Image (cartoon, rainbow, N blue to C red):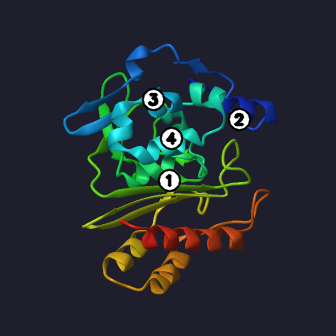
Amino acid sequence: MPIAGATDVYVGLNFGTLPNREYLDIWGIDELRGVSIQRDHLVLGALATYTDCIRSREVAQWMPMLVEASRLVGGPQIQNRGTIGGNIANASPAGDSLPVLAAADAIVVLRNASAERRMPLTSFYTGYRATVRRPDELIVAIEVPRIDGRQWFRKVGTRAAQAISKVVVAAVRSETGPRIAFGSVSATVVRVPKTEHALASGASIEDALRVLDAEITPIDDVRSTAEYRRQVARNLVRRFWNADM
């Protein structure tokens, strides 16, 4: 298993839940770091940390909702070690950066020794903590196209920060319609295209929320209940849609 910041890996090791017994530390590969603008895309190296995102002028201008999400990930220690590539690879449905990247139509760049391929983040996950990444591939970068419209991010947890999300949402509202992505309401991070279409087509917010109910599948767990998550998801979409442009 490739590891970098290892902020989630160490938790799994402590609880004995990881099947892996061999680990490859890639923290020192500087070629996987950095934030830049290339070919009209914001490019985040897989080892870009949350602190890098918070401090980056490019991220602040291109994707302020990622800055906001990064500020709510753990404390300074986790922000200094946790990486965007690691959050994607860890594949937790509660990953705070994942709805942001999904709402931004981000592309995951995968590379092995002989080839490189690109895949939308929304196609990267096949199930709970399962991805299409092959054993011989690394996530090397994330590419984000230009985002037109107002960006919006909210995290609901036991505390404002240093807590795993009960529900997390990121959204973009533009002239072409909304893009809305949720974490912690399904087995993976999810976009809600039918809800997006309903809002873009002029449906009432109440009708759109009924569509939303059919697109998310929250569960009961130690952090929350399915019904609470469903109600919070409704409230967040309503708040996003009613917010001033």
Q: Secondary structure at mark 2?
A: loop
Which of the marked residues, 2 or 1, is nearer the chain's N terminus?
2
Pair 3/1: label in front: 3
Residue type at tag 2: Leu
Per the image, the residue denoted by label 2 is 18
**Camera-side mark, 2 or 3:** 3
Tell me the distance, in whole angstroms, between the alpha carbons under discs 4 and 3: 20 Å
For the residue labelled by badge 3, is the local secondary structure a helix, a strand or a loop?
helix
- Helix, strand or loop for disc 1: strand
Kind of residue at badge 4: Ile
Quadrant of the frame with the C terminus: bottom left
Q: Quadrant of residue 62?
A: top left
Residue 18 visible within the image: yes
Disc 3 from disc 1: Cα separation:
32 Å
* Numbered circle sitting on residue 126: 1
Between the residue at mark 1 and the residue at mark 4, the CA separation in whole angstroms equals: 13 Å
Q: Position of residue 92 (x, y in %)?
A: 60, 47
Which of disc 4 and disc 1 is earlier in sequence? 4
Q: Dot 4: few (<14), some (14–19), or many (≥20) neighbours within 10 Å?
A: many
CB within 8 Å, label 2 to label 3 = no
Tell whether label 2 touches label 4 (CB within 8 Å). no
* N-term-proximal mark, 3 vs 1: 3
The location of residue 46, given as percent across then percent down, is 44, 30
Q: Residue furthest left?
A: 39
Distance in Å between CA atoms under marks 2 and 3:
33 Å
**What kind of residue is marked 3?**
Arg
Residue 32, given in percent of the width and then of the height, sits at 41, 22
What residue sits right under mark 4 in the picture?
88
Q: Which residue is mark 3?
A: 55
